[in-house]
Image: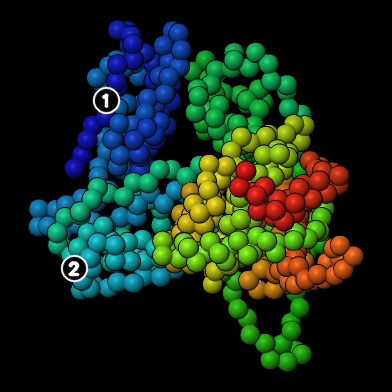
Amino acid sequence: MQQTIKVPDIGSNNAVDVIEVLVKVGDVINVDTPLITLESDKASMEIPATEAGIVSEIHLRVGDKVTMGDAILTVQSQVAARADNELDITIPDIGSSSAVDVIEIFVKVGDKVTVDTPLLTLESDKASMEIPSPAEGVITSVAVKVGDKVNTGTLIGKLTGSAPETKPTVLAPAPVQAPPPVVAAPAIIPQSPSNNLLLAGPAVRRLARVLGVDLHLITGTGKKARIQIEDVENYVKQRLQESPANTFNLPTAQDIDFSVFGAIETQELTKIKKLSGQNLHNSWLQIPHVTQFDEADITTLESFRKEQSALLEHEGVKLTILAFITRAVCKALQVFPEFNSSLAANGQSLILKKYVNIGIAVDTAQGLVVPVIKNVENLSIKQIALQMAELSQKARKKALLPSDMSGGSFTISSLGGIGGTAFTPIVNHPEVAILGVSKAAIKPKYENNQFVPRLMLPLSLSYDHRVIDGAQGARFSKYLSDLLSDIRKIML
């Protein structure tokens, strides 16, 4: 079904200029996705979408004058029913603007499927995800194969049968991950009120903020030298092609033929391992790491956990030590807010976050993924345990979306279920700290002139030394250990 989106009431009887068109034919849009930017004699304004779907036609261009009721574009529903009851099945909004790989296909022509039957598996740079069928019927064609790269709106195949039970899957767009500032850019001009004199729309200014680009350095190609999105993109490409003066001249690894020493087998890394390896390598090079080691006496906590686990078992709640640690970390981050921050791209200021989003590293067959529990400050230990179980299950079923793994402000990496006494976790940029948790063990502790057995939990706190000094690291670690040693303090 097609819908035409029109210019709403813009509070003016006069025609206004279209200065930016923010979408193109083929784009998948959601309700409230910005479509165009208009400029009157008083202000610029973005016009959002009132319908969701795939853009099939655009009715205006930059430079046109429009008023209320003028057609902006036409959208097509993502799953289109044909007269013979044949349905086109397309990739839903996967929360990523980049193409992703098809790594598995579960169906073939002639197969019967129901709603939510897995059709294929996609793999992005962060996770694998299964795409389910939106309808019941028989597969009549498959339009993709393993190895193809697909994006939102790509045709998966066709089926005949009943219409979808629900509306087409159109998910909220994943938050934009801000990359590092443009390399080797000239000195940034200080921002001042004069910045408002730049001719650039809201979308252009937002893109410039995300990319770390100073608009003063760009010459606009639009009307009256207005800076367009393409101007920002071309500037970034040009800067990336230049040879940066501060690039590390690291030696390349020597290619060794190990087969001369004996039999070998070459095993390809998964895409997740390849890309997470690049990110960890970049973090290790860019962040001066320090790791603080400590122990927490969790004897009382473990006794309390076992007691409550038995009571909550009938509710399907698996109460783990990690849920208590996550709640304690949240409390510590509120007392030491610099650990819940990010260093600004210019390295001159600290961005303190008022929310606490904690990433939990999960080991899967494809590699390490880090789903994020959002707004932990508003959750009880029971709620944390439920969300933790849900995200872990999604991770192992390859059902995590990019939005499930974005927005983290602090990470916990727990190896307690495997073993070890300590390790040095790598900070997950752009965060500034990460907590490593190893396996708890009974140790003798000297109390009241005698040694008593206590359950001790090893903690490894790595942090960015540009933001956090050794004294702060020790105080945070000590505070966290005290919280875990006294269950009453976590509950407060």
Whole-Å distance between the Cαs marked 1 and 2?
38 Å
Q: Quadrant of residue 423?
A: bottom right
Q: How many marks?
A: 2
Give the SS element for disc 1.
strand
Residue at 65 percent of width and 53 percent of height: 487
Label number found at residue 6 = 1
Residue at 79 percent of width and 50 percent of height: 478
Residue at 41 percent of width and 51 percent of height: 94
**At label 1, which amino acid type do we have?**
Lys
Closer-to-camera residue (255/484)? 484
Q: Quadrant of residue 420?
A: bottom right
**At label 2, which amino acid type do we have?**
Val
Q: Mark 2 sits on what residue? A: 138
Vertical relation: 350 (above or below) 195: below
x and y percentages locating residue 232 in the rendered image: 57, 32
Vertical relation: 477 (above or below) 50: below
x and y percentages locating residue 373 in the rendered image: 54, 50
x and y percentages locating residue 27 in the rendered image: 37, 42
Closer-to-camera residue (64/454)? 454
